[in-house]
Image (cartoon, rainbow, N blue to C red):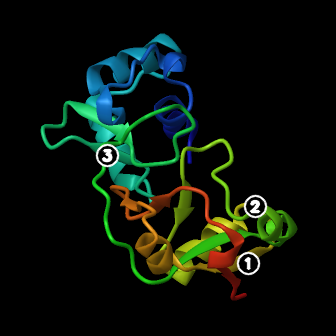
Amino acid sequence: MSRTPRMIARALRHEPALLGLTLAPGGWAPVDDLLRGLAAVGRRTTREELLAIVAADEKGRFTLSPDGRRIRAAQGHSVAVDLQLDPVAPPALLLHGTASRNLSGIFRDGLLPGRRQHVHLSETEEVARRVGARHGSPVLLEVGAGALHALGRPFFRADNGVWLTGPVPVTHLRLIG
C-alpha cells in the first residue's frame, strides 16, 4: 500500500488530528475535509484518486457513505468510535489468525483487542492465515463464537466482513493449525 492510503487509514483509525479530522458518530469524516487534510500535509489527492484508493484496497479498509460525501475506516480503530453497527448472530465458529509467538499469551489471557477496540475474527482460513502471516509464522485459532453469543456476548460484522467482538476467553479457543 502506498503512503497516501496508509496515511488515510492511520487518520481514520488511530489519529484523526493527523489530517485535521473530527470523526462523527459512526466514525465518519467528510470526504472534503479528508482531501483538505491530505493537501495540507503535502499529499494532494483528487476525489477520483480517493475513489480509486477505496476501490483498490484489498482488505476493504474504507467505506464511503452511499452519497459519497463521507468516509470511514471499516474497523481497526484504536480511538473510541462507535461504528453504529447492529449486533449480529455470528456463525458457530470463527477464526483468528496470529503469529505463533503470541500463543503463550493468548492461552494465558485469551484473545484481547490490544490497542484496538475489538478482537477481529474472520470466517475463512485464507483470511485468518493472511492476517497471522503479517506478524510472523501464522497459526489459526478457532473461536466458539456461537457459544459466546449464546452467553450474551455481542458480535458485529464490519463493512468489510470482519467480525468484531470483545475479549475472547481461553475456554472458547482451540488451536487448529
How would you rate the neighbour count of disc 2 (Cα within 10 Å): few for under 14, some for 14-19, many for 20 or more? Answer: some
Measured along the vertical axis of the image, is residue 68 above or below residue 31?
below
How far across and down, in percent of the image, does residue 29 sit? 33, 27
Q: Earlier in the sequence, mark 2 or mark 3?
A: 3
**Secondary structure under the numbered disc 3 in the rendered image:** strand
**What separation in Å lies between label 2 and label 1 (alpha carbons)?**
10 Å
**Secondary structure under the numbered disc 1 in the rendered image:** strand
How would you rate the neighbour count of disc 1 (Cα within 10 Å): few for under 14, some for 14-19, many for 20 or more? Answer: many
- Give amino acid for label 3: Thr
Q: Residue at x 43, y 71 (%)?
A: 149
Q: Which residue is mark 2?
A: 135
- Quarter where residue 167 is shown: bottom right
Are dots 2 and 3 in contact, CB under 8 Å? Answer: no
Of residue 150 and residue 34, the one placed in the foreground of this image is 150
How far across and down, in percent of the image, does residue 154 sit? 41, 60
**What separation in Å lies between label 2 and label 3 (alpha carbons)?**
25 Å
How far across and down, in percent of the image, does residue 113 sit? 63, 51
Q: Which residue is mark 3?
A: 63
- Quarter where residue 106 is shown: bottom right
Q: Which residue is mark 1?
A: 139
